[in-house]
Image (cartoon, rainbow, N blue to C red):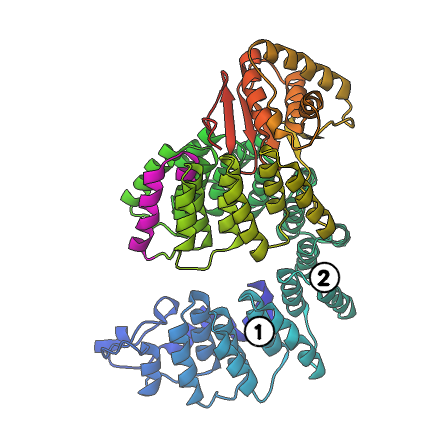
């Protein structure tokens, strides 16, 4: 790693020095066992010892005279290969040699422990060193940074300065990364100032770390300023900014930087593609995701590792489960992550049978399921009314020594509740071996709303209030249950509690992607440039679907107003406006994809089914729970949602 140029300078070029140093003068009969090079430098002892190294045996018996280069080469090899046990053997041998107090070798030992993840040994070594230099401090700080112990690294830095050691670009780069790991803007600003003080502000490694740190802390403006001021950029600095934009949901900026990156002669890496595909996943931007997929293929990259799984996830989240299946079939290596992505996709699309089949094939191929695997298949069973299968897989978790967590228990409650077995769901909660949480009682509350069980819904809501009083979704669900039962006084009480507590229901919005642009709508939207055409389109559609049987379901209007006003309230919900806009701006016969930030309204779900009959188009709606594939007047969810 270039971060350790100073240490590498001390270690030197191992092959040339080592070959001249380790050849022992012995008899011709066993000279082959006494000649060692880089390839077999860590070979085990020849005296049947499982815990020794042959080269150390040669030193011990006097056949080989050690020097600094020899020990450094041994430690370097242990560091490169992550051989902690062998590294400890070398360290023990050094402690009994004339080099036990050699600062260069001590730094190499410390570096080896830190890189092999043995931070306790590294810190013990660090604390016992009578003399430290810049390499010592940098090795310890970077070891903490690389092993996700950011706070320990930041605490060490002031001590370094007090002892008079001057940080270099590698020290500061590691410290900046630590600030990014813990999203500490305050510490990050202070370290940034130190970068200026010690003349490292223009270094590409420090600059890339600063871009990433500011982006992780949510300060994209400052990240962009640092990036623009960098005289020399590399793929890491570009990726840091692109990932920052993608993480904050600014997909258009991320894509613009991606295009600029290539124009300036930088080649995208797997991290670039993964960040952009994640952005497409969160926004449901299928067309942009397909464009990136095509670009990925043209670049000659194979669908392996993280980027292959990210592409698979993008298709499942963007509503094209069939494209996800194609990608899955072309993955260079199938692992539990890719299998889980497919299971999650099947669950989101309500394809319970396909999820069960996929799970069984996964087991046959010898891929061991984890907790996410079981959560995904249980969710798929819940959303497809596969009651017996869900119970079976919940019991199967014990076979794989996986203890059910809160999320698994909540899914079983959801499974029972959706099936109308509310009493069984309540008994299941009361008999659980763990304390039920707000999420578990919330699953029962959702089922009570679905089946209009007011009394049990109020009971479940009370349990949630006790465990998580600040969660606004509970109040909203309870108010809706009361409204469905016509208990308007209780609705008013719940809304008063919400108002007094400062809780607000998340405003609904829907969006569609047209020609790589995302158009967002809210209820009764008057801000869109095509608002007049959109409203006119929906009014015409509304008239046509009423003629073939659509009746507005005013039970979804939880306001104490007359019937006409309730129907008017339903008229311009965000998903209806998004649908009308898509019909105006897409070619006949193409699939329409609508995304929504909360669950789709029951009346809108019904209306869209009728629209699919009128316009003869497939309409895909993604809400927070699942995908609805609506075609020819019916939905893939079977109205079970």
Residue 72 appears at what percent x and percent y?
Answer: 47, 76
Q: Is residue 199 left or right of residue 59?
A: right
Checking the image for residue 534, the label placed there is none
Q: Residue, x 21% and y 77% (percent of image)?
A: 29
493, above or below 93, in the image = above
Q: Is the magenta region chiefly helix, strand or loop?
A: helix
Q: Which residue is mark 2?
A: 185
Q: Residue, x 55% and y 63% (percent of image)?
A: 1
**Discs 2/1, front:** 2
Residue 512 appears at what percent x and percent y?
Answer: 64, 28
Q: Residue, x 67% and y 80% (percent of image)?
A: 159
In contact (CB < 8 Å): disc 2 and disc 1:
no
Depth check, front residue: 342 or 625: 625
Of helix, strand and loop, which one carries label 2? helix
Residue 102 is covered by the magenta coloring? no
Residue 370 appears at what percent x and percent y?
Answer: 38, 52
Q: Callout 1: 10 Å neighbours few (<14), some, many (20+)? A: many
- State which region is magenta: 379-401
Residue 442 appears at what percent x and percent y?
Answer: 52, 47
Using the rendered image of the protein, determine whether residue 588 is visible from the camera's viewpoint: yes
Depth check, front residue: 410 or 68: 410
Q: Callout 2: 10 Å neighbours few (<14), some, many (20+)? A: some
Q: Which residue is mark 1?
A: 139
Quarter of image, res 544: top right
478, above or below 549, in the image = below
Of helix, strand and loop, which one carries label 1? helix
Q: How many marks?
A: 2
Depth check, front residue: 600 or 165: 600
């Amino acid at each position: 790693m270039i971060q350790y140029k100073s240490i590498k300078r001390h270690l030197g070029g191992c092959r040339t020095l080592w070959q001249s140093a380790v050849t022992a003068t012995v008899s011709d009969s066993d000279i082959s066992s006494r000649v060692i090079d880089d390839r077999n430098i860590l070979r085990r002892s020849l005296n049947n010892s499982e815990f020794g190294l042959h080269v150390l045996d040669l030193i011990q018996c006097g056949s080989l005279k050690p020097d600094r280069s020899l020990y450094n080469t041994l430690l370097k090899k242990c560091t490169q290969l992550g051989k902690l046990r062998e590294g400890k053997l070398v360290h023990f041998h050094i402690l009994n040699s004339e080099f036990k107090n050699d600062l260069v070798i001590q730094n190499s030992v410390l570096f080896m422990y830190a890189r092999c993840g043995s931070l306790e040994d590294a810190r013990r070594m660090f604390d016992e060193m009578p003399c430290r230099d810049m390499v010592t401090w940098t090795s310890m700080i970077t070891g903490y940074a690389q092993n996700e112990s950011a706070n320990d690294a930041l605490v060490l830095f002031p001590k370094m300065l007090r002892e008079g050691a001057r940080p270099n670009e590698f020290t500061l780069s590691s410290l900046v990364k630590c600030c990014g790991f813990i999203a500490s803007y305050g510490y990050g600003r202070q370290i940034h100032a130190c970068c200026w003080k010690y003349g490292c502000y223009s270094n590409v490694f420090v600059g890339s770390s600063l871009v990433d740190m500011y982006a992780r802390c949510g300060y994209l403006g400052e990240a962009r300023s640092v990036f623009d001021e960098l005289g020399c950029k590399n793929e890491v600095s570009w990726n840091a900014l692109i990932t920052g934009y993608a993480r904050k949901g600014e997909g258009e900026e991320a894509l613009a930087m991606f295009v600029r990156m290539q124009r300036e002669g930088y080649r995208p890496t797997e991290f670039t593609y993964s960040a952009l595909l994640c952005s497409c996943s969160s926004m449901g931007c299928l067309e942009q995701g397909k464009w990136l997929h095509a670009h990925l293929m043209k670049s000659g990259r194979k669908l392996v590792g993280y980027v292959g799984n990210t592409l698979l996830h993008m298709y499942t989240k963007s509503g094209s489960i069939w494209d996800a299946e194609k990608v899955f079939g072309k993955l260079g290596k199938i692992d539990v992550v890719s299998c889980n992505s497919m299971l999650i996709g099947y669950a989101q699309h309500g394809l319970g049978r396909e999820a069960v089949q996929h799970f069984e094939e996964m087991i046959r191929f010898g891929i061991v399921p984890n907790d996410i695997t079981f959560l995904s298949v249980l969710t798929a069973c819940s959303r497809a009314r596969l009651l017996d299968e869900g119970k079976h897989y919940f019991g199967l978790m014990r076979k794989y020594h996986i203890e059910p967590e809160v999320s698994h228990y909540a899914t079983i409650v959801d499974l029972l509740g959706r099936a109308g077995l509310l009493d069984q769901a309540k008994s299941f909660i009361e008999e659980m071996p763990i304390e039920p949480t707000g999420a578990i009682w919330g699953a029962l509350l959702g089922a009570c709303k679905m089946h209009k069980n007011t009394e049990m819904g109020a009971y479940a809501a009370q349990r949630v209030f006790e465990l998580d009083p600040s969660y606004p979704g509970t109040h909203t669900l309870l108010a809706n249950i009361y409204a469905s039962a016509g208990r308007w006084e209780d609705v008013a009480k719940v809304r008063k509690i919400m108002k007094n507590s400062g809780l607000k229901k998340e405003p609904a919005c829907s969006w569609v992607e047209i020609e790589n642009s995302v158009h967002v709508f809210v209820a009764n939207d008057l801000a869109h440039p095509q608002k007049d055409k959109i409203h006119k389109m929906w009014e015409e559609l509304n008239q046509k679907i009423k003629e073939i049987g659509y009746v507005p379901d005013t039970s979804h209007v939880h306001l104490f107003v007359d019937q006409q006003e309730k129907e008017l309230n339903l008229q311009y919900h965000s998903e209806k406006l998004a649908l009308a806009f898509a019909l105006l701006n897409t070619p006949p016969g193409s699939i329409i994809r609508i995304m929504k930030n909360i669950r789709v309204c029951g009346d809108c779900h019904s209306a869209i089914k009728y629209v699919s009959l009128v316009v003869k188009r497939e309409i895909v709606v993604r809400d927070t729970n699942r995908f609805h594939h609506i075609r020819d007047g019916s939905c893939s969810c079977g109205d079970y949602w």
